[in-house]
Image (cartoon, rainbow, N blue to C red):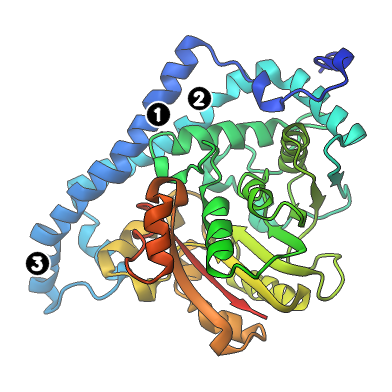
Amino acid sequence: MPEAPLTKAETGKLPLIDHLYHPTHDEISRQRLVSAMRKFVLTDMRGKMKSAYDMLEAPAFKARHGHTPRNGREADQAMAKNDVTHFYSSLRYNAQEMVWASVQEPVERALPDMISVARQAAATNPAGGSLTLDPTLEVPRYVSEIDVHLIPGCFHTEHTKDDVAQGAVTAFGGSVFAGGLSWRKDSKGRNGGVGESVAFYLKSKYPDFKPKRILDMGTSSGKNLFPYLDHFPDAEVHGIDVAAPLLRWGHAQAEAYGLPINFSQQNAAHSNFADQSFDLIVSSFFFHELPVKVTRQILAECKRLLRPGGFMFHMELPPHKDLDPFMNFFWDWDTLNNNEPAYTAFRSQNPTALCVEAGFKRENCYEITIPNRATFGDDKFARFIAGEIPAPEHGSGGWYNFGARA
């Protein structure tokens, strides 16, 4: 691939790498269609499946077995031959593939310029952040051997030198993925709703907590890390991931936005940071993509890295124990259909028990669903903090989190 000249290099300013992406009118229309399809599947079709379950399949299961489904596995058995379920699965699977296909062509057109900007960011670090890559790092098999989320090439594949393609496809595909679901957004319109909500919760609930160093594990391109600097501007912020294209993309974005974030290519199960290096360790949508044995290793690593009084906050899928059989059937769909084989195994765990096993005191562990700040509003968020109202359920305006305080 020929190298393009640095965009706007003569101005001395770093261009916004995401502004180099220019889908055509037809491509935008296609992306909006896919977003609308995903929203229809995850809201309307989910409701139709629940009606089919309540009115038809759960009673039929009870007639056959003497009891209604007791867990997600039995709910799956009950729904296995239901036409609504088949239609839902077909639409959802195809919509998932269409998400990534809808952004690939405009990413390919802009890729030479994007790579040039990422190189410029890595060479100059105008915001004061950094990018440290390790070409010898072995990408774990649970990433390298499957296309997680059906993303062609997964997160880590590099097609050319200094590649950012997978970062761009993941970022713009993520916008299509979440386009019809406003609760994924933060107050600035970015797909950083998780990070902003957790940061705002910590700052509101614990006003004396002022972390000096923050680590985001499995940071991807850092979208859920950016909001932490909005709320804790004096913190030194780090994001680690095994995928170099995501890190290059996230670093270029952060530098152009003036966010001094230190990105490094590391495996979260055994990082190179010193003991007690961080006051706050976070992650978003991370653990359900890992084998449970790796989850245990990473939680032990969090215990090693946290300073006394520090927080560990991991936004994740709610565990089986917290949901009814139908909702467990609904959430575990991804295990077999979205290239996320560890999904059900992770959700079958007790997150608090995992934290205790990692060395945290049980009384310092927590599981909490936090509202999405941008859609919930600050007045209601204050009432949530005060214990007056609950958060929306996970996946419908709320974010389930588990963790502990060191």
**Amino acid tagged 2:** Ser
Q: Quadrant of the N terminus?
A: top right
Residue at the top extreme of this rendering: 25
The type of residue carrying mark 1 is Val
Q: Nearer the viewer, mark 3 or mark 1?
A: 1
Number of disc labels: 3
Contact between marks 2 and 1 (CB within 8 A): the answer is: yes
In the image, residue 358 above or below residue 369: below
Q: Secondary structure at mark 3?
A: helix
Crowd around label 1: few <14 · some 14–19 · many ≥20 (10 Å): many
Q: Residues within 10 Å of mark 2 (few under 14, many from 20)?
A: many
Disc 2: which residue: 102
Displayed quadrant of residue 188: top right
Of labels 3 and 2, the one closer to you: 2
Residue 38 coordinates in the image, percent (x, y): 36, 37
Q: Is residue 230 left or right of residue 190?
A: right
Q: Residue at x 59, y 19 (%)?
A: 105
Looking at the picture, does residue 156 appear above or below residue 119? below
Label 3 sits on residue: 59
First-in-chain label (3 vs 2): 3
Residue at x 87% of width, y 50% of height? 134
Q: Residue at x 9, y 58 (%)?
A: 56
Label 3 to label 2: alpha-carbon separation? 41 Å
Q: In which quarter of the view is residue 21 placed? A: top right
Mark sitting earlier along the chain (3/1): 1
| Left or right of residue 62, residue 246 in this image | right
> Can you tell which mark lies on residue 34?
1
Whole-angstrom CA distance, mark 2 to mark 1, is 8 Å
In percent of width and height, residue 275 lies at 84, 75
